[in-house]
Image (spheres, rainbow, N blue to C red):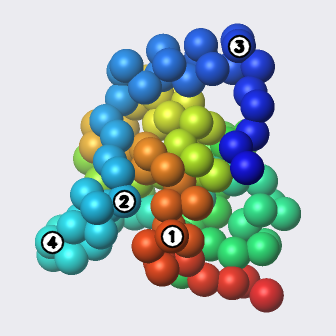
Amino acid sequence: MAKKHSPRFLATVKQSRALIQECDIDQFSSMLNDGEDIVVIDVREQHEYDAGSFEEALHLSKGIIERDIEKPPIPEDARNVLYCGGGFRSAIAAESLTRMGYTNVYSLWGGWRSLVAAGLASSNQ
């Protein structure tokens, strides 16, 4: 069942999506196998991450990503793929990282739900 989001939130997501790079699950799967480095960042809330995640994901929730993105050694030109539940929060977070100077940032459209459907999700419990 899809979540019902507020009109202002949806407008914000639409603006962010127009400014960022996105990938779908097929493109993400290709990225995983193309031999190039990739940093996968889960921007969901802690309780969502605790329930399951992409196995190699770094957890930096949307609420703290700007503050903590520089703590791990992630170069500004590293290929970063962000995901949330469906691709809305990750789009906003991707725009924020782009504003901060990160140049190779993607938001995974379909997010966690697409990872689960593709068999790329793992339980953290």
Q: Name the image quarter holding the C terminus.
A: bottom right
Residue designated by label 3? 7
**Position of 59 relative to 70 (above/below):** below
Could you tell me the amino acid type at mark 1? Ala
50 or 101: nearer the eye? Answer: 50
Q: Is 54 on the left-hand or right-hand side of 5?
A: left
Q: Secondary structure at mark 3?
A: helix
Q: Is residue 70 visible?
A: no
Q: Furthest residue to the right?
A: 47
**Position of 109 relative to 120 (above/below):** above
**Position of 27 relative to 52 (above/below):** above
Q: Earlier in the sequence, mark 1 or mark 4?
A: 4
Could you tell me the amino acid type at mark 3? Pro
**Label 3 neighbour load within 10 Å: few <14, some 14-19, many 20+:** few
Residue designated by label 1? 117
Q: Earlier in the sequence, mark 4 or mark 3?
A: 3
Q: Which mark is residue 25?
A: 2
Q: Which mark is residue 95?
A: none
Choose mark 4 or mark 3, whichever is in front. 3
**Position of 11 relative to 100 (above/below):** above
**Label 2 neighbour load within 10 Å: few <14, some 14-19, many 20+:** some
